Image (cartoon, rainbow, N blue to C red):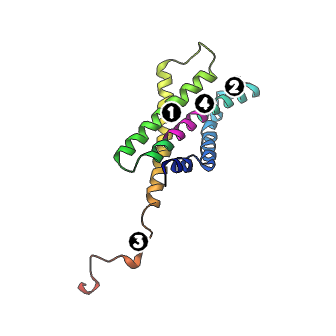
Amino acid sequence: MGRMAALARELSWKRFAIVVALCLVISTEILFQPSVYKDGDAAAIWRGWIDFFLEVLLCGLAMWIAVSCVEAFLPDGRMRDVALALAVLAGAASGYAIATWWLQPAGFYPPPLNMSGDILRWALFGGVITLAHAHVKRAADVPKELTLSTWTSPYPIDSV
């Protein structure tokens, strides 16, 4: 399979929908904070959640694109694993940078330490999901011929 075909397979609509669904679920964490409902009216809560969802979505999409490029262009091995980790981190940082630039008012940006913490948080979410996805892909590559009938015991039955 060519590399561009592999990239097209990685960037499918099905995977896009999965990324959006995961981002939607993750973004609901803001709705489970009791302090949100104390002073906010429904419109402010809705707007805050939409902004947070867009931030999570931009980070998720950037990580998905970066990871898909690594998976399509690098062969399996240690170098690919390192590249996947760097892709997750770069995707989280670029998605967060775009979200901050787009969603925050000009001149009102979070302190750099807060931004670093948010990038690390999104990278951890993305890293766990990428690790699970890589595990599933590697497990699917295990030969299907390994069945009980082809397995031989190291302890022959006659020796008992």
Q: Which residue is at the front of the view, 64 or 50?
A: 64
Identify the secondary structure beneath mark 4.
helix
Q: Upstream in the sequence, badge 4 or badge 2? A: 2
Earlier in the chain: of badge 3 and badge 1, it is 1
Q: How many numbered marks does the figure carry?
A: 4
Find residue 155 and report its horizontal and vertical position in percent: 26, 78
Q: Earlier in the sequence, mark 3 or mark 4?
A: 4
Instruction: Find residue 102 and report its horizontal and vertical position in percent.
Output: 62, 23
| Most distant residue in the left direction | 159
Of labels 3 and 2, earlier in sequence is 2
Residue pointed to by mark 2: 38
Contact flag, marks 3 and 1 (Cβ < 8 Å): no
Q: Nearer the viewer, mark 2 or mark 1?
A: 1
Are there few (<14), some (14-19), or many (20+) residues within 10 Å of tag 2?
few
| Residue nearest the viewer, comparing 50 with 67 | 67
In magenta, the rendered stretch is 57-66
Provide the residue designation for mark 4: 55
Question: Disc 1 marks which residue?
Answer: 92
**Circle 2 sits in a helix, a strand or a loop, which is it?**
helix
**Residue found at x 56% / y 37%:** 60
Residues packed near mark 3 inside 10 Å, few (<14), some (14 to 19) or many (20 plus) = few
Mark in the foreground, 4 or 2: 4
Which quarter of the figure has residue 38? Answer: top right
* Numbered tag placed on residue 146 in the rendering: 3
